Amino acid sequence: MQELRIAQKVEDMIQYGYVAVRRFPKSERHVSSAQIREAMWELLELVIICSKRYHKKTSLQELDIKIELIRRQLRLAMQLQFLPMRQYEHWAKMLDEIGRMTGGWINATRQQSR
């Protein structure tokens, strides 16, 4: 059930992200915004992979790494003023929630393997 909630949260973040990156400057719209969109889709792919695999440890670590990558991309976009602070804060909260859910999933997987 956890897998379904986290997948929905990632889908919600993707929808928000597509709206937010439309405000990027034209010069960055095809580079930075494309990389962020691609990373978000990869995040959803990793959630699906983790939910289907029997041995999840490596996949969950990759998921955690991808979350950190997106977190840093968003922070840089805000610092470069491609993303307004208000949108950055909302997007970061969405990503933090996904990160907390992933952490819980990692802990639950560790508990099961003992």
Image (spheres, rainbow, N blue to C red):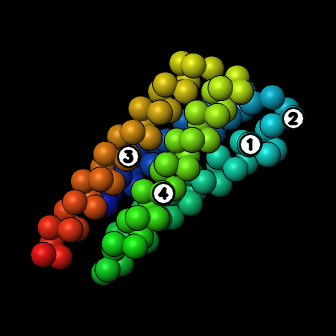
Gap between marks 1 and 2, in whole Å? 9 Å
- The kind of residue on which mark 2 rests is Ser
SS type, badge 4: helix
Reading the image, the residue beneath label 2 is: 27
Left or right, 65 with respect to 83, comes to left
Reading the image, the residue beneath label 4 is: 65
SS type, badge 2: helix
Gap between marks 4 and 3, in whole Å? 12 Å
Quadrant holding the N terminus: bottom left
Mark 3 or mark 2, which has the lower sequence index? 2
Give the foreground label among 4 and 3. 4
Give the foreground label among 4 and 2. 4
Reading the image, the residue beneath label 3 is: 98
Quadrant holding the C terminus: bottom left
Gap between marks 4 and 2, in whole Å? 27 Å
Q: Residues within 10 Å of mark 2 (few under 14, many from 20)?
A: few
